[in-house]
Image: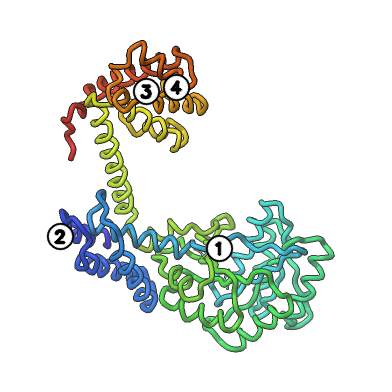
Amino acid sequence: TLSDRLTSALQNLRGKGKLTDADIDATAREIRIALLEADVALPVVREFIAQIKQRAKGAEVSGALNPAQQVIKIVNEELVAILGGETRRLNLAKNPPTVIMLAGLQGSGKTTLAGKLALWLKKQGHAPLLVACDLQRPNAVTQLQVVGERAGVPTFAPEPGNGVGDPVDVARRGIEEAKHAQHDVMIVDTAGRLGVDEELMRQAANIRDAVRPDETLFVVDAMIGQDAVNTAEAFRDGVGFSGVVLTKLDGDARGGAALSVRQVTGQPILFASNGEKLEDFDTFHPDRMASRILGMGDLLTLIEQAEQAFDQDQAEKAAAKLGTGQLTLEDFLEQMLAVRKMGPIGNLLGMLPGAGQMKDQLAQVDDKQLDRLQAIIRGMTPAERADPKMINGSRRARIAAGSGVAVREVNDLVNRFFEARKMMQQMAGRFGFGGGSATKS
Ligand code: GDP
Ligand code: MG
């Protein structure tokens, strides 16, 4: 698996301080194989890898991750961005009915999708109508009616006994029916062939011209892998589409079709289908697909954990400095300002191990008080800020007068500072990272 191969790549690269071209090339080779194994089309792989290399070469060296991990992180981020960068909601028409047309090869899952989409829309308060424009296969209309019934949504179909019927005519009359029966969305099911052919494209284009869809969804079976690119291009050129639906993701498809179709057509993937039941359907999640394509959810979790551990390491170093007892009023002010800048106090202090008590104390400081504290500290001489013990009675009076507060407030601040400093030293002692004896480096 990719995970295994990358693990050995990681072995080779471990301990290096920066991302060299060789590191990037080695990791890129493994990623390339992973993408091909996930059935991403070759030209798409090439373009993607080139992009990744470029970004990796400009990347800053991370303290948290080794070079291979860093490249993987970049790959994952780029994948997620490409798969979901422009994910958007279904376009609904300003003047209902919204027309959604489904297009795709036979067996791609259009009719099933019609039912899924209808149920999904119904749950959101819409009143969809299914329109049966697949008159090619003898039981296609019945199949749509069956899924419609299961979704609790009516189906508009040509009257039986009329012979073969004209799908374009049915589509047109479907709009009238939707308006008449006050359906705000209509979903047009169309015929597909096993392979791309001109007659199919012409028929789909004619239906498109008759109903002028707000959305044309290209439905593609995720299992078809490499072929997805050719099919997508044919439908893009023959009918045009505004969004993609991936089906059969419950199979063992590695998801490469998603990346290929997205990359080649530039159209967003709106939905994913993952089963035969009407409920097996969801909006598309780029992050899940990215980790499916890379096949290394575990590795991505590890990378995340490494980064978190690194953050904690930094926090401990900061705490160690505070624990040396060298904390000055200047630092204190800086801390308070940092707290204000960072928003909720808890977030910042949560990073310091054992900072519970300190948190309570700072939580009592509101913005207005912070302004006054700042004024007081600014009113001190640099020597006073560096060594608050020297702030005696007459200095306090001078500071109070200079910053426009009562002497009592200066007293409060100085006392609070000494308390905080004591607390930090205690914490540092308790957690063993104070007094310059920080263990991690
Ligand atoms: P159409 O020819 O494009 O209308 O495709 P259908 O909707 O008739 O689906 C073809 C077959 O694929 C049917 O047997 C469906 O039950 C099945 N199918 C459709 N979507 C999915 C899916 O997401 N997962 C699985 N496992 N089967 C699906
Ligand atoms: Mg069908």
The residue wearing badge 3 is: 358
Specify which label sits upstream in the sequence, 2 or 3.
Answer: 2
Image side of residue 356 versus residue 196, left or right: left
Q: Residue at x 34, y 34 (%)?
A: 351
Q: Residues within 10 Å of mark 4 (few under 14, many from 20)?
A: some
Q: Quadrant of the C terminus?
A: top left
User: Residue drawn at (36%, 77%), measured in percent from left and top?
Assistant: 42
Of badges 3 and 1, the one in the foreground is: 3
Residue ID for mark 4: 402
Q: Nearer the viewer, residue 170 or 61?
A: 61
Discs 4, 2 touching: Cβ within 8 Å: no
The three-letter code of the residue at mark 4 reads: Gly
Mark toward the viewer: 1 or 4:
4
Marks 3 and 1, Cα distance to the nearest angstrom?
Answer: 47 Å
Quadrant occupied by the N terminus = bottom left
Across and down, in percent, residue 232 comes to 51, 77
Q: Amino acid at mark 1?
A: Leu
Q: Which residue is mark 1?
A: 270
| Residue 365, image x, y percentages | 47, 24
Residues at marks 1 and 4, CA–CA distance in whole angstroms = 63 Å
Residue behind mark 2: 12
